Amino acid sequence: MKKKFLYLILFFCSLTLLSACGERTNSWQAIKERKTLVIGIDDSFVPMDFREKNGNLVGFDVDLAKAACKKLGLKPQFQPIDWDMKETELRNGTIDVIWNGYTKTKARAKKESFTEPYLKNKQILVTRKTEHIKNYQEMKGKILGLQTGSSGADAYDTYPKVLKDRVASTVQYDNYNDAFLDLKAGRINGLLIDSVYGDYYLKHTKDGNDFSKSVLPYPSEEFAIGVNKKDKTLTKKLNWALNELKKDGTISRLEKKWFN
């Protein structure tokens, strides 16, 4: 009897441990207690999250996250991450959310939850004017640049007839800054990029007039906040904060500030 009783105790303890390992605890409660929201970002993604020359972190998403956290009584902690590992970081709990011009897609929605969208985006093709590439059809046999783990890379694979079946090869980049350096140097012929980044970069760089951009026939995109699927309370709280910021005009003001 004693042996049987001991086995029962061990059995229920093992079930408890498995449950704890397989289930994320109430992260909203932990976030509320520490009064901090850890936000995973790519700090080179203009104009959403990027560094000024003095090192300060600025951008549309930086301002929006600060405003949302204020509504929730939290302090934002911006955590630069390897963008290709963003879903792993979220799943492991090293960050609470992905909030960095993060496009909601069907593939990503299988891995994590999303808040309501707060901004629209699209993919564009940027080329040097000296290449005389007027549209994506003229990328046949050319070299294309992509950011690893980006929504553009997803669209490239999902809709192969647009670019994948045309180009000779691709070069993958960790960030768009490096991709633009290669584009300027002629190491790639075109760059597939988010319009929010491409438009802002070309407007603010001194040699922006040296480039052309063309629209791609990919579906339009929406930016939202990525949340662990088990963090339902956190998703609801963030949706409430975003809705409040829409109603009080904060999001409209930020759009004018960063996108004119």
Image (cartoon, grey):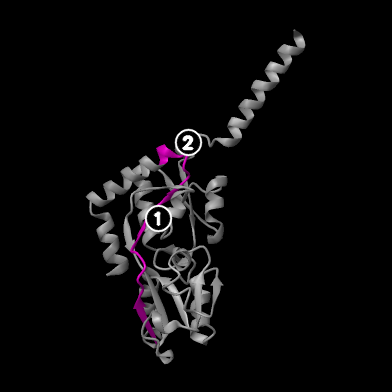
| Vertical side of 131 occupied by 165: above or below | above
Q: Please state the horizontal and vertical placement of residue 245, each as a whole percent of the image.
A: 28, 50
Magenta region, residue range: 211-234
Mark toward the viewer: 2 or 1: 1
| Vertical side of 152 occupied by 111: above or below | above
Q: Please state the horizontal and vertical placement of residue 2, each as a whole percent of the image.
A: 76, 9
What residue type is disc 2 on?
Answer: Glu
Residue under numbered circle 2:
33
Name the residue rendered at 38%, 52% in the picture: 66
What residue type is disc 1 on?
Answer: Lys
94 relative position to 249: left or right: right
Q: Quadrant of residue 252?
A: bottom left
On whether residue 113 falls in the magenta region, the answer is no
Per the image, label 2 sits on a secondary structure element best described as helix
Q: Earlier in the sequence, mark 2 or mark 1?
A: 2
Residue under numbered circle 1:
104
